[in-house]
Image (cartoon, rainbow, N blue to C red):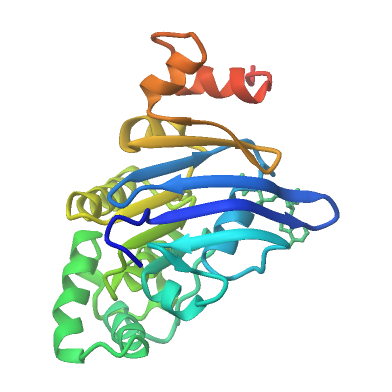
Amino acid sequence: MTSDSPALAVRGLAKRFERPAVDGLDLVVRAGEFYALVGPNGAGKTTTLRMVAGLLRPDAGEIAIFGIDALREPIAAKQMMAWVSDEPMIYDKLTPLEYLEFVAGLWGIDPAASGEAARELLVSLGLEGHLHERCEGFSKGMRQKVALAGALIHDPRLIILDEPLTGLDAVSARHVKGLLAERVRRGGTVIMTTHILEVAERMADRIGVIAAGRVLAEGTLAELRQQNGRTDTSLEELFIALVDVEPAA
Ligand SMILES: Nc1ncnc2c1ncn2[C@@H]1O[C@H](COP(=O)(O)OP(=O)(O)OP(=O)(O)O)[C@@H](O)[C@H]1O
């Protein structure tokens, strides 16, 4: 590991189910970037991120997290990152504070230190009124926020999120976006998939467009525009032009 290693470097990543889902994908995300992965349904975004998070073994390819070979040293790699799935699992019988204390304990964090961090995280996500309620009565959005707080409790340098804003109301989405932007301001790296192109356009430093298991194009919005010879078009228009799908009526 070197201090100038990218947060994520993926080379030749491949995974096949019935058909290839990820097909020789290359991706580099620099430390301190907010990177959005966009692409049509079935493009291979989730499969890519699941392999990066160590949840799925690639058929081929290399994955390095801050220079650590994630396939050879999965535990060291996982310590650097957080994975937030689009279907988060939390323990219903615990309150958010208890859940975060439990997760912090798994990471070996001293409860005295984790308690304050847990409270801060939950408050920043708008859960201050629910710190002592059991999660079993929580809405999907509240559960998503508790899971996100749990993923961040060990202060990971790389945060990987699959569709973190789906199902959140506007206020909750703002809390989550604010928290992620804050992490990046403090030097963290965020990689997230989203179908909300406006979010990618507004929040991401760089955007990767994936289709058929490969990165079709990537760059800042300005670079994507330039690559496509369209100077002032929206990401949505670029996306449709790139992946060659008809806009919904
Ligand atoms: N566990 C699995 N078993 C079989 N096929 C799978 C599995 N996981 C993913 N696939 C297939 O791999 C392809 C890529 O799926 P993936 O979920 O990575 O796409 P995605 O870009 O995240 O799509 P979406 O935007 O719809 O979430 C799809 O054809 C999907 O059906």
Query: Quarter of the image holding residue 205?
Result: top left
Q: What residue do we see at 38% from left, 76% from top?
A: 79
Using residue 218 as the reference point, say whether residue 242 is left or right of it.
right
Q: What residue do we see at 57% from left, 45% from top?
A: 26
Determine whether 81 is above or below 90 in the image: above
Q: What residue do we see at 67% from left, 63% from top?
A: 58
Which residue is at the front of the view, 240 or 48?
48
**Total tally of numbered discs in the picture:** 0
Which residue is at the front of the view, 225 or 145?
225
Query: Quarter of the image holding residue 147?
Result: bottom left
Determine whether 4 is above or below 84 in the image: above
Which residue is at the front of the view, 64 or 49?
64
Q: The C terminus is located in which quarter?
A: top right
- Which residue is farthest front? 2
Query: Quarter of the image holding residue 232?
Result: top left
Percent x, y of residue 230: 47, 9
Q: The N terminus is located in which quarter?
A: bottom left
Percent x, y of residue 246: 68, 18
- Which residue is farthest right? 18
Determine whether 96 is above or below 236 in the image: below
Percent x, y of residue 151: 37, 70
Determine whether 16 is above or below 73 in the image: above
Which residue is at the front of the view, 72 or 83?
72
Percent x, y of residue 247: 63, 19
Using residue 121 as the reference point, say whether residue 218 is left or right of it.
right
